[in-house]
Amino acid sequence: MRRPETATAPAGTAVFVPDPKVKRSAIALQSGTAVVAVGGWAGRPYHSLPWEPIYLSLDAMRRGDWSEAAETLEREAGEHRDTAILNYRLACCHARLGQSDLALEELTRAIEINPDLRERSRSDDHFASLRDHIAFPA
């Protein structure tokens, strides 16, 4: 395993990483610091990725505001509305809100798209209230 490289980047510094295979991260060491990451593909216009709406909903999820998290996911999903991970996260929100039918619908769709999520759902605390439901897809 390669040792991570570090760089000190004072205010206004841009760091270019040309190899898209390199895993990148940034840590702000002073409060009030903003770290901005920009990415894309050579020769293609930028398009959003499925994790972006999830990222926007994380604060609400951490606060336990499942209604706000679900609304953010729905509003920001765009072209990713029918991706496995977005359906899965919406299922988590609906389960936490006690909306069993919506949660089971989203979870079932997530597993249809990505069967590996079936195993994950079996131990995910978000779905504890649904595990005994006849329609639970595990």
Image (spheres, rainbow, N blue to C red):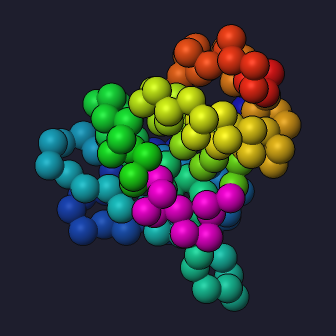
Spot the residue most to the left.
Answer: 32
Q: Can residue 56 be seen in this view?
A: no
Occupied quadrant, residue 47: bottom right
Which SS does the magenta portion mostly show? helix
Residue 9: x percent and y percent? 31, 56
The quarter of the displayed image where residue 116 is located: top right
Foreground: 119 or 8?
A: 119
The range drawn in magenta is: 73-82
Q: How many numbered dots are placed on residues in this image?
A: 0
Instruction: Name the residue at 56% across, 15% down.
Output: 129
Is 89 left or right of 105, judged from the image as shown? left
**Residue located at (81% from left, 48% from top):** 113
Screen quadrant of the N terminus: top right
Q: Residue at x 47, y 68 (%)?
A: 38
Q: Within the magenta stretch, is there residue 95?
A: no
**For the C terminus, which image quadrant?**
top right
In the displayed structure, 44 sits above or below 3; it is: below
In this orientation, which residue lies closer to the viewer: 37 or 80?
A: 80
Residue at image position (61%, 61%) is 81
Using the rendered view, name the quadrant where residue 41 is placed. bottom right
**Is residue 101 found left or right of 8 in the rendered image?**
right
Give how far across and how far down residue 80 sits, in percent: 62, 63
- Residue 134, given in percent of the width and then of the height, sits at 75, 19
Image height of 78 relative to 85, above or below: below
What percent of the width, then of the height, locates residue 65? 31, 35
